[in-house]
Image (spheres, grey):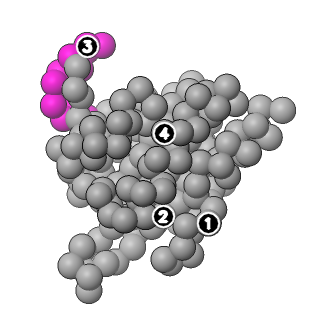
Amino acid sequence: MLKVGDKLPAGALQEFIEVEGDGCSLGPNSFDIEKTAAGKTVALFALPGAFTPTCSAQHVPGYIQRAAELKAAGVDEVWCVSVNDAFVMGAWGREQKAAGAVRMMADGSADFTKAAGLTLDLTARGMGVRSQRYSALVVDGVVKTLNIEAPGKFEVSDADTILKQARALKA
């Protein structure tokens, strides 16, 4: 399982791009995790699924609301990672008004989640293999903090916790 001091697993995440530019075409684009995180401080949070109740009502909105404070605390980018395809993550990002605040990163086949050892089996609930709910502060691809939720909980992976950790890391 991913732990503090580890590099993020190698691979790619997909993001649905709304506006063409910076070498990105409209629609799903694939981003190499190592290259995309290089030289940056990333607040990464992962959750079981797009459009699910806690994720939509609390988790994503908290990071959107705290985006400016996270940047002031030294965070370059905020990534929301979920085992959904890029089309779903793009639609969810539009609905949440995440543009410019949170990058909605798709892990469609759960490759990143499996490599991180942070899967959650929701097969019995008709959702298949998903991601556990967690957050991490990642500096130049290396995990500096990691906050993994207990099953069914939303207590330590929120934006306020990562903001405190980012401020402490910057100090």
Q: What residue lies at 21% left-to-right and 16% top-to-bottom?
A: 20
Q: Measuring from the top left, give residue 67's x and y in whole percent.
A: 55, 34
User: Real-space Cα distance between discs 2 and 4?
Assistant: 17 Å
> Circle 1 — which element?
loop
Circle 1 crowding by C-alpha within 10 Å: few under 14, some 14–19, many from 20: few
In the image, is 146 to the left or to the right of 36?
right
Determine which residue is flagged by label 1. 155
Q: Are discs 3 and 2 less than 8 Å apart at CB?
A: no
Determine which residue is flagged by label 3. 21
Depth check: give the residue in front, 84 or 51.
51
Toward which corner of the image does residue 54 lie, by quadrant? bottom left
Q: What residue lies at 48% left-to-right and 64% top-to-bottom?
A: 133
Amino acid of disc 1: Glu
- For the question of whether residue 38 can be seen, the reply is yes
Secondary structure mostly taken by the magenta-highlighted segment of the chain: loop
Q: Measuring from the top left, give residue 72's x and y in whole percent.
A: 67, 25
- Give the residues drawn in magenta, as a range: 20-30
Amino acid of disc 2: Arg
Sequence-first disc among 2 and 4: 4
User: Real-space Cα distance between discs 3 and 2?
Assistant: 32 Å
User: Real-space Cα distance between discs 1 and 2?
Assistant: 10 Å
Q: Measuring from the top left, give residue 171's x and y in whole percent.
A: 84, 32
> Circle 3 — which element?
loop
Circle 4 crowding by C-alpha within 10 Å: few under 14, some 14–19, many from 20: some
Determine which residue is flagged by label 2. 133
Q: Are discs 2 and 4 less than 8 Å apart at CB?
A: no
In the image, is 62 to the left or to the right of 26?
right
> Circle 2 — which element?
loop
Determine which residue is flagged by label 4. 64
The nearer-to-camera label among 1 and 2 is 1
Q: Spot the residue most to the top.
A: 22
